[in-house]
Image (spheres, rainbow, N blue to C red):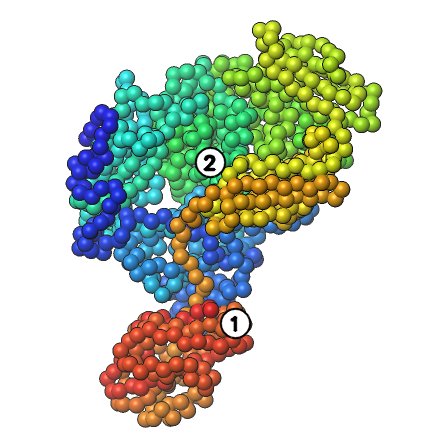
């Protein structure tokens, strides 16, 4: 049921669901016995904790030992008994400390004998380890590990047990850690082996934990990850917001709860709400559904991307058990067989680009704020859509598209309806289906089986899986062939995607007049930013958008789309250059030439072409190329004006070179005899000047200039931004051909990457130096948590005046993080000597072979002795390398009985009470193996030993 109307009090809504607490008093006064599912209460319904720090990293593989012995074979078959680097006690103290997200491939040198498609960077195997400390108050809560992306194949161990194997670098992983977790002083070991030898693409893919990782703690009865589906659809003259909520119960008893959902506007005002009961059996899922009806919401569009929040609470009587907030947008999207795409009832040509997920300097480990920069650059381009190629993107990309108003074709990576691959497709749809920006699900890209009956059957199953989760959006596939075979993939999708094949648009439309069509990929034009002469030896391609070997151009490809109403729009390959796939040259080229912008997001000439084609709400005009052609005086230089005005006139030093009607597809061109000076284009609309653009001959570079992308940053340790560096002449004009080597220093932040957009450069993208390429370079900085309130960037270059720039840093709390600690070495196998009548007799056993004694563990005490006396218990171990160098501690979490602790004959500590208790002793630095001896006073029938782990802890 639903409560309609506006201005509903959320307090009233919760009261109608039986909730007595306010929003600011969630969980207050709840006793342990009131917890849903029969488990103890926690202090908050949901804790989302970032796990980006405390990671230790090893590049390369660590082979597992060969299992040969009987006892080892027995142990090998048991839970919690991983070997090698997966073992809880493995010594990782000398491993490098890294922070996530982390693309370890981006740190590799660019080498000619590495894989071309992957940008000539070596991939390989790597290990990540961390140790987690869970508070005792977390006992009884559901604890989930969330890995948003790990490239490529990964095996995850938690406390020595394999908890997941993942087969794609593009899907997220959620792992229930609850059954394996320990609490308090008993640390939890998380080990991840990443195999990036495996490749899923023919472009740079990176490697490692390159997307965020989190720990989420919830009530045992909770809303599952991606468990709220709330996507509005028009109905009659209004809208309905169907809310589907999936709950899980990890508790020991069935739980009867109420789902309460409400729609809020940007100001937090509740517009409509509803509730419905749900019963969740123990260790099962249950789905609740309700409809919220909204009469006249503000619509989401590419011009006004209005967003609403859907707040969903899971209530157990008067207690909020869990709460999830999702966003939604009210928009009606449809594809028409004759007129293309419609948004909110209005025709809209899709002006899209394909986007890979890497950037200069950082590879695939892109901070959220850098994604924000990339999306803003696309909006400046006039772009209104992106295709996520060829994989599900990080979720922040979709959040930004929702916020900025970009349509999205969300694309699956694996073309395979087998269970593992189908699970990846379902994961993508479940995660992404609330985003109003998404208008299409794409199930593959350019598959050889696309024109076959087998391909048809594969897509039929994949499309069915998508529709089972989201019936509101059409399914497409990006086809580069097979369109006219008797049975093919086009017959199994809702919208047929053309990759290139623009000469077949008309024939297919005639043959299949009832099928909507879109250009899922087009253009693939090649160019080098700032270069206007094609030179094979220099590996540069002129940026005029001239055809290469008869291939497409930006201008020609868009004309084929724009002049056909039945083509819904297109996606240019690509919005940005990307590492890898360095066609057409190969080495030393190591990144692509396809982008409208380069790797840094700096504009190529194609940027101006598409602005002229795509921007309609204001006049735009640009002029290419630059006007620094020293040595070519008297030669004719090709000049191109890119504008959306009616006419354009070109002037050289104030002298008109002719006025032309604007060609909206091919742009306007002149051949101009070069002479130094100012070249200016003037655009006219309605006979009046509407826009101006110019280039002029500069002097030599004399100084550097820094331009931060933003004037303020957030000092949370996560915020980041690019800084543009350029060389300028004595009049402050950017010198377009400068190639100076620049050195950077930064105060108050960290340099996380460098780039310049040169597809042929093998220079490192880490460090503090980068040469300008055709006048530009980019520095990427990231704030430090709790750092100074001002960030200072300085740049120097030989022979040039240096530059500096200050950026304000706003104080901000650090994100909530999961507590981590250095890895402990558990001492879990001890040996007990025979009972001795005196302490001296017991200590004499230190000279004996302990392996002949009775072995026992640390989880429960040793069996009592039959008579009074003394018992020596011993262990041999090699401490962590760092403990060997600096010393450490031995922590007895629960030591049972009175005893003395010795190491090498030296008394380290004494426990006088027989009752179990915690004890710590210092362990001195020292190389090699060590031995601990505990001398217990063991009265007949009394427990002794341990009832908790014994740990060697780093200082």
Disc 2 on helix, strand or loop? helix
Within-10-Å neighbours for mark 1: few <14, some 14–19, many 20+: some
User: Horizontally, is 163 left or right of 790 in the view?
Assistant: left
Residue situated in front as seen by the camera: 936 or 569: 936
**In the shown orientation, is residue 159 left or right of residue 715?**
left
Residue 221 at x, y = what percent?
25, 48
**Residue 318 higher or lower than 564, as above or below:** below
For disc 1, the marked residue is 886
Mark 2 is surrounded, within 10 Å at the Cα level, by few (under 14), some (14 to 19) or many (20 or more) other residues, namely: many
- Image vertical order of residue 47 relative to residue 854, above or below: above
Quarter of the image with the N terminus in it: top left
Taking 87 as reference, is 377 left or right?
Answer: right
Disc 1 secondary structure class: helix
Q: Position of residue 659 (x, y in %)?
A: 68, 9
Residue in the picture at 61% in, 16% down:
691
For the point 30% across and 78% down, the residue is 896
Q: Name the quadrant containing residue 136.
A: bottom left
Give the label on residue 924, or none. none
Q: Residue at x 48, y 15 (%)?
A: 566
Which residue occupies the extreme top position in the image? 687
Could one spot residue 476 in this view of the protein? no
Residue visible at 53% across and 45% down in the picture: 790
**Mark in front: 1 vs 2:** 1
Residue 4: where, in percent of width, then height? 21, 26
Q: Which residue carries the number 2 mark?
A: 397
On screen, residue 128 versus residue 629, left or right, reads: left
């Amino acid at each position: 049921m639903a409560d309609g109307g506006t201005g509903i009090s959320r307090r009233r809504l919760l009261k109608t669901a039986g909730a007595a607490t306010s929003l600011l008093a969630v969980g207050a006064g709840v006793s342990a016995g009131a917890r849903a599912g029969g488990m103890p209460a926690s202090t908050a319904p949901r804790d989302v904790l970032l796990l980006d720090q405390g990671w230790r990293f090893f590049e390369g593989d660590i082979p597992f030992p060969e299992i040969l012995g009987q006892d080892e074979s027995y142990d090998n078959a048991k839970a919690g008994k991983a070997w090698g680097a997966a073992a809880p006690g493995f010594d990782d103290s000398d491993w490098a400390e890294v922070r996530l997200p982390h693309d370890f491939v981006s740190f590799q040198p660019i080498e000619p004998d590495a894989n071309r498609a992957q940008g000539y960077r070596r991939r390989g195997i790597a290990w990540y380890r961390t140790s987690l400390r869970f508070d005792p108050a977390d006992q009884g809560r559901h604890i989930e590990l969330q890995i948003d992306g790990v490239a490529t194949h990964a095996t995850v161990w938690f406390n020595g047990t394999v908890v997941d194997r993942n087969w794609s670098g593009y899907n997220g992983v959620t792992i229930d850690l609850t059954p394996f977790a320990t609490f308090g002083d008993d640390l939890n070991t998380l080990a991840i082996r990443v195999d990036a030898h495996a490749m899923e693409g023919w472009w740079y893919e990176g490697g490692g934990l390159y997307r965020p990782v989190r720990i989420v703690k919830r009530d045992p009865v909770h809303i599952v990850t991606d468990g709220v589906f709330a996507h509005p659809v028009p109905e009659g003259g209004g809208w309905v917001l169907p809310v589907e909520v999936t709950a899980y119960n990890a508790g020991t008893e069935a739980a009867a709860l109420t789902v309460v959902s409400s729609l809020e506007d940007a100001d937090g005002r509740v517009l409509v709400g509803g509730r419905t009961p749900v019963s969740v059996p123990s260790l099962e899922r249950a789905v609740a559904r309700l409809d919220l009806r909204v009469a006249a919401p503000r619509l989401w569009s590419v011009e006004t991307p209005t967003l609403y929040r859907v707040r969903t609470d899971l209530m157990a009587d008067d207690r909020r058990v869990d709460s999830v907030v999702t966003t939604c947008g009210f928009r009606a999207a449809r594809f028409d067989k004759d007129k293309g795409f419609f948004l909110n009832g209005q025709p809209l040509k899709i002006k899209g680009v394909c986007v890979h997920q890497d950037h200069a300097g950082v590879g695939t480990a892109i901070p959220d704020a850098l994604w924000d920069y990339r999306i803003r650059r696309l909006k400046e381009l006039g772009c209104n859509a992106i295709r996520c190629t060829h994989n599900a993107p990080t979720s922040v990309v979709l959040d930004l598209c929702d916020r900025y108003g970009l349509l999205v074709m969300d694309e699956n990576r694996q073309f395979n309806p087998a269970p593992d691959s189908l699970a990846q497709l379902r994961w993508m749809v479940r995660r992404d289906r609330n985003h109003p920006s998404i208008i299409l699900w794409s199930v593959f890209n350019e598959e050889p089986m696309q024109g076959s009956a087998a391909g048809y059957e594969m897509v039929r199953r994949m499309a069915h899986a998508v529709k089972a989760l989201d019936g509101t959006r059409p399914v497409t596939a990006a086809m580069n062939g097979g369109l006219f075979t008797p049975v093919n993939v086009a017959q199994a999708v809702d919208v047929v995607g053309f990759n290139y094949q623009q000469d077949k648009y008309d024939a297919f439309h005639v043959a299949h007049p009832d099928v909507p069509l879109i250009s899922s990929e087009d253009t693939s034009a090649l160019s080098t930013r700032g270069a206007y002469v094609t030179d094979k030896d220099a590996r540069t391609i002129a940026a005029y958008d001239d055809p290469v070997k008869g291939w497409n151009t930006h201008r020609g490809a868009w004309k084929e789309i724009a002049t056909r109403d039945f083509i819904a729009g297109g996606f240019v390959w690509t919005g940005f250059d990307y590492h890898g796939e360095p066609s057409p040259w190969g080495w030393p080229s190591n990144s692509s030439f396809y982008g409208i912008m380069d790797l840094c997001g700096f504009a190529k000439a194609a940027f101006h072409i598409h602005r002229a084609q795509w921007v309609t709400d204001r006049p735009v005009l640009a002029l290419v190329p630059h006007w620094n052609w020293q040595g070519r005086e008297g030669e004719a230089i090709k000049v191109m004006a890119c504008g959306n005005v009616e006419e354009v006139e070109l002037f050289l030093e104030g002298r008109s070179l002719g006025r032309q009607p604007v060609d909206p597809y091919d742009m306007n061109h002149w051949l101009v005899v070069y002479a130094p000076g100012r070249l200016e284009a003037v655009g006219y609309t309605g006979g009046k000047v509407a826009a101006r653009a110019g280039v002029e001959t500069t002097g030599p570079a004399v100084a550097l200039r820094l331009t931060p992308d933003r004037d303020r940053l957030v000092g949370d340790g996560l915020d980041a931004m690019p800084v543009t560096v350029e060389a300028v002449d004595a009049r402050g004009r950017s010198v377009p051909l400068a190639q100076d080597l620049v050195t950077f220093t930064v105060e108050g932040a960290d340099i996380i990457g460098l780039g310049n957009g040169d597809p042929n450069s093998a220079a490192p993208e880490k460090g503090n130096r980068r040469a300008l390429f055709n006048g530009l370079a980019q520095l990427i900085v990231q704030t430090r948590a709790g750092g100074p309130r001002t960030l200072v960037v300085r740049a120097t270059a030989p022979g040039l005046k240096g530059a500096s720039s200050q950026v304000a840093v706003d104080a901000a709390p650090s994100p909530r993080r999961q507590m981590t600690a250095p890895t402990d070495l558990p001492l879990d196998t001890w040996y007990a000597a025979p009972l001795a009548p005196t302490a001296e007799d017991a200590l004499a056993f230190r000279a004996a072979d302990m392996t002949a004694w009775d072995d026992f563990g640390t989880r429960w005490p040793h069996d009592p002795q039959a008579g009074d006396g003394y018992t020596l218990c011993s262990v041999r171990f090699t401490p962590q390398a760092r403990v060997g160098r600096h010393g450490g501690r031995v922590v007895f979490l629960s030591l049972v009985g009175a005893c003395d602790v010795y190491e090498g004959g030296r008394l380290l500590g004494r426990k006088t009470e027989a009752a179990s208790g915690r004890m710590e002793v210092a362990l001195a630095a020292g190389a090699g193996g060590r031995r601990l001896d505990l001398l217990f006073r063991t009265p007949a029938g009394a427990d002794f030993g341990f009832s908790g782990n014994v740990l060697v802890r780093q200082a």
